[in-house]
Image (cartoon, rainbow, N blue to C red):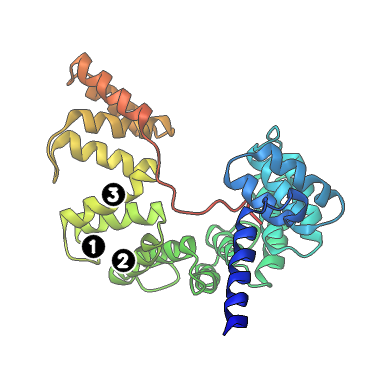
Amino acid sequence: MKSAVRSGVLGLMLAAAACDAPPPPAAAIPAGQQIEAAIGRGDFAAAIELIRPLAESGDAKARKQLGALYERGKGVTQDSFEAVRWYRLAANQGDAEAQNKLGTFYESGQGASQDDAEAMRWYRLAADQGYPVAQSNIGSLYAKGRGVPQDDAEAMRWYRLAADQGYSVAQSNIGSLYAKGRGVPQDDVEAARWYRLAADQGDPQAQNILGSLYYSGRGVPQDSAEALKWQHKGAEQGYSDAQLILGLLYGNGNGVPHDLVQAHMWLNLAAIAGNGKAIVLSHMFDARMTPTQIGDAKTRAREWRPKRIAPDSLGP
């Protein structure tokens, strides 16, 4: 009994000592965790200091991360060419995400010569590893006939590979093919089903389209309240087409209280995002509002922040 008591007391003393112990030095924390912590707190300069030595020593993940930082201009001056250089190093080591990224640069012509065939080559390398984003990108090239003969059936096949892994962009693209009857029989119900799968994952374009389907009653029962819910979800993520529609709804009092300030705010946000229709409409609404209302709407637009659903992919 005494031995058990002494053991219990000793255990408590050791636990207390552990609580009082200083945190481990940074050197004792794995580099991956340090990088993740730096990115999580937005300290990209610190992340660069940790990532660059690993990248220069040949670490594929670090090379991919460094490419992403150059692509986005986080902790470094934005440089598409430098991003491509680091993505290529990681891609040549077989990193599927880097291979896909390299494909996007060839497709867009940013940081590399525009070359759809080369884009397809890199997408295929990533897709053959089962990477769903690359599979969806291949589907898009077939749908557009870029670098390959235009083929909606082949586009659908690649979209399905990605969608079956839960990739929301591919699910939304399948919805589009069903809505237009491209490569499959036209089917509004099936289109709405695929848009809903993407929308439930937070895809703002799918949320906007699903909202429009509920307004019109295409493929789903007509439901203005459900339509407004999905338009709000897309708009709150910063999707300008959804913001434009919300601006019109509030401006006309269609299914929502008539609110010119709210309308102007959403149109302002869509205009800031480069939506040409919103730019024109926001000026038209100016004539219907007082200077105080316009000022209030602009203040709300400045203070508004998007709700981000997708996680940042810079982390390890």
Determine the secondary structure under disc 2.
Answer: helix
Q: Nearer the viewer, residue 21 or 57?
A: 21
Q: Which mark, residue 164?
A: none
Determine the secondary structure under disc 1.
Answer: loop
The residue where tag 2 is placed is 192
Residue at 39 percent across and 52 percent down: it is 204
Mark 2, Cα crowd under 10 Å, few <14 / some 14-19 / many 20+, is many
Can you tell which of label 2 and label 1 is closer to the viewer? 2
Q: Nearer the viewer, residue 72 or 272?
A: 72
Could you tell whether 37 is left or right of 293 in the image? right
Determine the secondary structure under disc 3.
Answer: helix
Q: Nearer the viewer, residue 96 or 1?
A: 1
Q: Nearer the viewer, residue 21 or 233?
A: 21
Q: Amino acid at mark 1?
A: Arg
The residue where tag 1 is placed is 218
Q: Amino acid at mark 2?
A: Ala
Q: Earlier in the sequence, mark 2 or mark 3?
A: 2
Could you tell whether 99 is left or right of 199 in the image? right
The residue where tag 3 is placed is 231
Q: Give the x, y percent position of residue 16.
A: 60, 60
Q: How far is mark 3 from mark 1, CA to CA?
A: 16 Å
Query: Is residue 269 visible from the viewing direction of this image?
Result: yes
Question: Extreme bottom residue here?
Answer: 1
